Each structure stands twice: as C-alpha cells, then as structure tokens.
Image: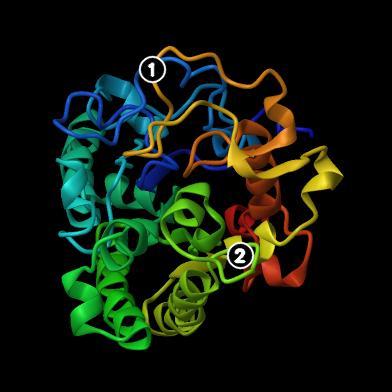
Amino acid sequence: MKFIHGQQQVPCLFFYGDSQFDNGNNNLLITLAKANYLPYGIDYPEVQPQFLGFDNPIPPFVTARGSDILKGVNYASGAAGILDESGILQGDRFTMNRQLLNHRITIGRIGVLLRNNQTTVDDYLNQCLYVVNMGSNDYLNNYFLPVLSPARLLYTPDRFAEFLVQKFSQQLRTLYNSGARKVAVFGVGLLGCLPQQLANFPTNGSACVDFINNAAQLFNNRLIPIIDDLNNNLPDAQFIYVNITSISLGDPSAIGVRVTNVPCCVVRRTTGLCAPNQVPCSNRNEYTFWDNFHPTQILNRATASRAYTATLPSDAYPFDIRTLVQQ
C-alpha cells in the first residue's frame, strides 16, 4: 500500500473522535478507556496523516504545544460520544462537546503564533482538513449497554438515531463556525460484528448481532441528508461522508485477513481491551480485530486507504478525502 510522500496536501489536520483515533488524550484521565500499556503500541494506528503527506503523527491535545499545533491537533478520546452521557461508565473522557471546546483553546494558541491577525488565522483554518469519527460509543456505551440503558427505555432505535443526528448536526455547525470548511465525517461501522457484542448479545444464528447493525445504520442513513444540508446552507462548506459500513463489507481475505470474529490479543472480559503485558497472536496481519473493539493495523490501513481514495462509489459521498483536499 503506497503512501503519499512529499508535500503536505493540507497545512493542518484536526481529528475528533473516540478510541479509534485517540493517541494519548486519555492517558492522564481517570478512565478504563486507555491503551498506554503493552501490547498496545506494537503497531501505530494513525495512518491517515501519511496519506496526506504528513511526516509525523498529529499530536494529542493534552501534549500539543508550540508551533507543532500549526500542523494540527488530535482531540479524540476513548469512550467519547456525541452525547455527553455516552461512555460515562468508563470514566472521564473528552466528549465531542469538550473536544470542540478544546479546539477553541487551540485556535487561541494559533492566534498567538500568527500574531493575532484574525484574517490570517481564519484563512489558515479554512485550508485545514477536519476528520470527525463519532457515534460508536453512543451505541456501544450508551444505547446498547449490556444492562438496559435509560436511552433504550426512552427511545426506539429510529427515534434515538434522529435525536443523535440532531445533536451531531449542531456540533458540526459549531465546527464550521470555528473555521472548518473541509470536513470528513466518518459513519458508524458494523458494531454488531465486534467480538464484544458477539459475547454480550445473541446472534440468533447470524454472523453478527443484526439488531445492533440495523440500529447503527439508521444513524448512518441520516448523515447524507445532513451533509447535503450543511453544504447547501453554509457558505464555502465542503463536508463529506465516509461510509465505514461500505468499506467494512469488503472481502477481508483480499488483504490476507482470515480471522474475523475473535481478537488477536488476550482480552479482559470486563472491558474488552487487551490484558496488560500479555503476548498477542504472532500473525496479527491475519486478524480483523486487535482487541474486542478495535481493528488491527492492517485493517486500519485498508480503511484509511479507501477513505482517501474510494474503491466503490458507496465508500464516500459526494466524494472521497483525496478529492476534498484538492478542492
């Protein structure tokens, strides 16, 4: 798989999301959702910057300082969701709303670096790429908790998806109002196929927990109209939707993956994360899942590749990340 080398395609890159993108923001928080121990770190998951010509990873917000922030900041936080209450049982986390507030702090710091010239700051931020991957924990660590959640008592899956998308739409508008113009919004993947969900819920003979996948798809189906609304009503807005479900439905054997329903590492049953200092499988490039929630590096690379350059028309709407950064 070839990466783009040479000149960066955008001056800066900002990540918002959950544990799929978190590269250190949760380390000092009181939370179960952290991965700052072996065997985590054998591979490094942040491959999207490489496709965009960045030589180094984007620093996490909690350690990003000085001129490094001009290349971008990663705000993602394990267990974070669109809703403030999502993931609360895991402990502290930077929710989407908190990540947006942290971005305002970064903008202030960028202002100082650019001599408080607001026009220069605005022009700079307008050129950056913003990648948002939120929503999984609103299902995994809220609606579909193994114990009956308040959200499931209050909302049908359809009503919950509508409620979630309304909140998310407001957050994306807040991001736009902070200077974002090029925004890639990742949908929710096949959550019902995660090993943790297979352990917690009946499959009724299916390969996955279909009612979880169906509920998440109700959320995804509402994202394209939101993308259209933002692009049609906000001047110069260029939002795209990255269809993780479409990408996930590809044949894993095409990249050498053979084990699709169990994790590579030894997991703690209570958390679904890798047990500390246990030796993982030796053939991790043949596994879909690293632990009970997260893909292996080979899957991360394949997903990033198709998000950057769509293989199928259904992979991204209205176009892929490569086209977005060229606009």
Q: Is residue 249 above or below residue 269?
A: below
Direction from residue 110 to residue 158 in the image, left or right: right
Query: Residue beneath label 1, please?
Result: 276
Where is residue 313 drawn, in percent x and y?
A: 75, 71
User: What residue is rendered at 38% in x and 31% in y?
Assistant: 268
**In which quadrant will I find the C terminus?**
bottom right
What is the number of the mark on residue 78?
A: none
Mark 1 is on which residue type?
Answer: Pro
Which of the pair 226/291 is nearer the observer?
A: 291
| Mark 2 burial class by Cα count in 10 Å: few <14, some 14-19, many 20+ | many
Which of the pair 24/39 is nearer the observer?
A: 39
| Mark 1 burial class by Cα count in 10 Å: few <14, some 14-19, many 20+ | some
Q: Is residue 8 visible?
A: no
Q: Is residue 274 above or below residue 161?
A: above
**In which quadrant will I find the N terminus?**
top right
User: What residue is rendered at 49% in x and 65% in y?
Assistant: 202
* Alpha carbons under labels 2 and 1: distance apart: 31 Å
User: What residue is rendered at 63% in x and 45% in y?
Assistant: 304
Q: Secondary structure at mark 2?
A: helix
Which of the 4 image quarters holds residue 110? Answer: top left
What is the number of the mark on residue 245?
A: 2
Q: Secondary structure at mark 1?
A: loop
Q: Is residue 12 visible?
A: yes
Q: Is residue 234 above or below residue 156?
A: above
User: What residue is rendered at 36% in x and 26% in y?
Assistant: 35
Which of the pair 293/60 is nearer the observer?
A: 293
Where is residue 44 drawn, in percent x and y?
A: 53, 24
Mark 2 is on which residue type?
Answer: Thr
